[in-house]
Amino acid sequence: MTPLEHITKVLDIIDSFVWGTPLILLIILGGLFLTIRLGGMQFIRLPLAMKYMLKNEKQGKGEVTSFAALCTALSATIGTGNIVGVATAVITGGPGALFWMWLAALLGMATKYSEGLLAIKYRTHDPKTNHVLGGPFYYIERGMGPKWIWLAKFFAFAGVLVGLFGIGTFTQVNSINTAVNTAYKTIFAGSDIAKISFLGTEYTLVTVVSSVVIALLVGLVVIGGIQRIGKVSEKVIPFMVVVYLAISLLLIVTNVTKIDDAFVLIFRSAFGLDAAAGGMLGAMMVAMQKGVARGIFSNEAGLGSAPIAAAAAQTNEPVRQGLVSMTGTFLDTIIVCSMTGLALVMTGAYNGECGQGAEATMYAFNVGLPFISKTLTDTIVAICMILFGFTTILGWNYYSERCLEYLTKGKMKPVIAFRWLYIIAVFIGPYMTISAVWIIADIFNGIMALPNMIALFALSGVIVKETRDYFERKKRGEIEE
């Protein structure tokens, strides 16, 4: 066993502990608790939330529009998790992982609503940096009280680590690199890719070039801060989602006769019905663990990241931004992740025999769309992967910087140093194994989610009160839309 394999094995043990039954239940029950207290907000108010998503509030205070804030959040959530994350969940946890991903998302919409509301209610303006700051660290400190500052700092520290070593860098650029290499092999079939040896391991020239190019592009954008990230996200997010949904819907429509069997397989697998009698519970727990963990990785409901972006929105109404934030989980998991999951199940790509991550997704589209050349489908998926991953890298740089600003009390020198570390992490991401980077991301996600979920339980009364007050004022005609 190689040193990397030993490290991966240790990380896997830690991952199983972090994402054990307690944390899964905390997130699921947290979403259920908020859903009940808010009277099914995510179902009843979804049309209004969609309206607010597209219509910015007049004369709202903040750094960017509500839509730009949502796009910044979506840039971090709609990423490689929607393609690679879903694939790894369905391959390792079975098709049933998709069911638990859906359940976590539906309940997570109430969680994301609550996060967005609290972000606006407890945000603050830093005169040193001229930044509007908000997120779990502020609603823990200002909402729960000074004695909980240690928990706020713990969250902020975890947020820096998640961005630098988890969702923000390694997983994204590693997945982009895999997609680029796969697409290159398809486009230039038969030609050998030049390789470079480093520390006893060979890497393709494509990997080296892509790591340099991505790091340079990330550096050009992140130096500009939230305004530049918001502008890039507003342009890229709608385009890439439409392209990916179009090719996914084409696959589903042309294979519509298989959709019934796919849903049956998903639901049977979710409850371990296809496993041997003694292994039903174990199979169900694996599907639940992978589905919930990858679902949280993708839509970040309960993680506490999205409210950091929401806090910058130009709005005076916490509830309004909570509704806008809620749409992010719906678009990310219920729409985009479902497309990937159904493609994998309907084409049989979930069995893992055709590769892991991006390779499995590319295989699914090749099998499901045989009338389109493999070169074209691989290229389209690769482009989507690049755009998805790139925008996620940008979004998480913003999240981590805000966490660091909180820890350093607004000092910008550590933030500037962090930007360079972040760019370096992006550069080295392609040289790590895919299994290791996803396990690392899962571990840091779990550490970050814990303090945020504690805060949501503690402040649930504030969330309910603000919600009732807003809709009472809206009913009286006091809310301008």
Image: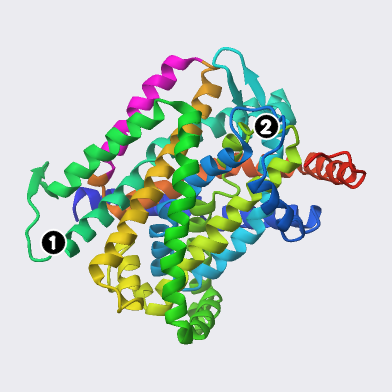
How busy is the neighbourhood of tag 1: few (under 14 within 10 Å), some, or many (20 plus)?
Answer: few
Whether residue 144 appears in this view of the structure is no
Name, please, the residue furthest toward the top.
128
Question: Is 423 covered by the magenta stretch?
Answer: yes
Residue at 73%, 61% (x, y): give it: 43
- Disc on the earlier residue, 1 or 2: 2
The amino acid sitting under disc 1 is Phe
Between tags 1 and 2, which lies in front? 1
* Secondary element at image label 1: loop
* Residue segment shown in magenta: 411-429
How busy is the neighbourhood of tag 2: few (under 14 within 10 Å), some, or many (20 plus)?
Answer: many
Q: Is residue 177 left or right of residue 29?
A: left
Which residue does the numbered mark 1 point to in the structure image?
188
Quadrant the N terminus occupies: bottom left
Which residue does the numbered mark 2 point to in the structure image?
140
Quadrant the C terminus occupies: top right
Instruction: Give whichever of 195, 222 is nearer the camera.
Output: 222
Marker disc for residue 198: none
Eyeballing the image, is 165 above or below 351? above
Instruction: Give whichever of 279, 216 is nearer the camera.
Output: 216
The x and y percentages for residue 131 are 57, 21
Residue at 47%, 67% (x, y): give it: 339
